[in-house]
Structures are given as C-alpha cells and as structure tokens.
Image (cartoon, grey):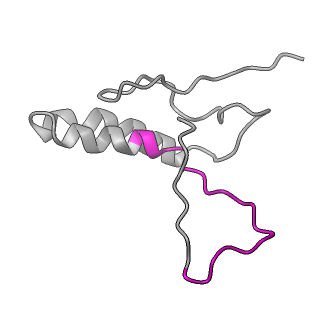
C-alpha cells in the first residue's frame, strides 16, 4: 500500500478547529487500481482475473496493522500493471 495523500474537501460549513483527522486511502486501493488498469490492457477476460484475485484476497484479509507493518494476511505478490512495490511482511522476532 502506498502512503499517498488523499485530498481533503472543504465543506460549506468549514472545518472545525479541533478536527485534525486526515483521510487515509483504503489499504486495497492500489490493488483496485491494478484491476482497473487490467481492464484496458488487451483482452479483459485474460488480463483481469489475476489482479482481481489479488484484490479479492486483499479485501478479505483482516484489516489492521501489526507493530506498524502491513497486516499479515494481505497478499505480497507484485502488482501486474502498476509500477509500485508490493506490500512487505515484517516479522518481529522477540
């Protein structure tokens, strides 16, 4: 998952002064973008199933982080069409 900033929209009522929360992209956004890109690469019946399988695994994995690393169930296979590094699993040995 990339840590790209999500633009914040200004509401007609403005922002509360104490509200410092920032929106975060969903952990599977990059997998969804890979599926969308696959739709436009040749025959979709051949290009979409692989990226969609990884997207579905990502969506079904348990959300959350273990010690500031990615969830242990999130797929770590490389993206098919996006030029991004895949998520890494970090194991903390105690």
Q: How many marks?
A: 0
Closer to us: 94 or 79: 79
| On-image quarter of the C terminus | top right
Q: What residue range appears in magenta?
A: 12-31
Q: Residue furthest right?
A: 94
Quarter of the image for residue 30 reads: top left
> Would you say 26 lies left or right of 89 here?
left
Whether residue 46 appears in this view of the structure is: yes
Closer to us: 44 or 23: 23
Q: Main secondary structure of the magenta part?
A: loop
Q: Position of residue 23 (x, y in %)?
A: 61, 57
Q: Position of residue 65 (x, y in %)?
A: 71, 39
Does the segment drawn in magenta span residue 27?
Answer: yes
Closer to us: 65 or 13: 13
Q: Residue furthest top?
A: 93
Quarter of the image for residue 83 reads: top left
Q: Residue furthest bottom?
A: 13
> Would you say 16 lies left or right of 59 here?
right
Residue at 47% across, 40% down: 57
Residue at 32% across, 26% down: 80
């Amino acid at each position: 998952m990339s840590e790209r900033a999500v633009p914040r929209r200004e509401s007609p009522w403005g922002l509360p002064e104490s509200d410092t929360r920032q929106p975060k992209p969903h952990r599977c956004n990059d997998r969804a973008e890979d599926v969308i890109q696959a739709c436009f690469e040749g025959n979709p019946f051949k290009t979409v199933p692989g990226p969609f399988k990884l997207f579905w695994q990502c969506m079904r994995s348990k959300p959350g982080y273990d010690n500031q690393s990615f969830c242990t169930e999130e797929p770590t296979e490389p993206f098919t069409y996006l030029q991004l590094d895949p998520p890494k699993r970090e194991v903390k040995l105690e």
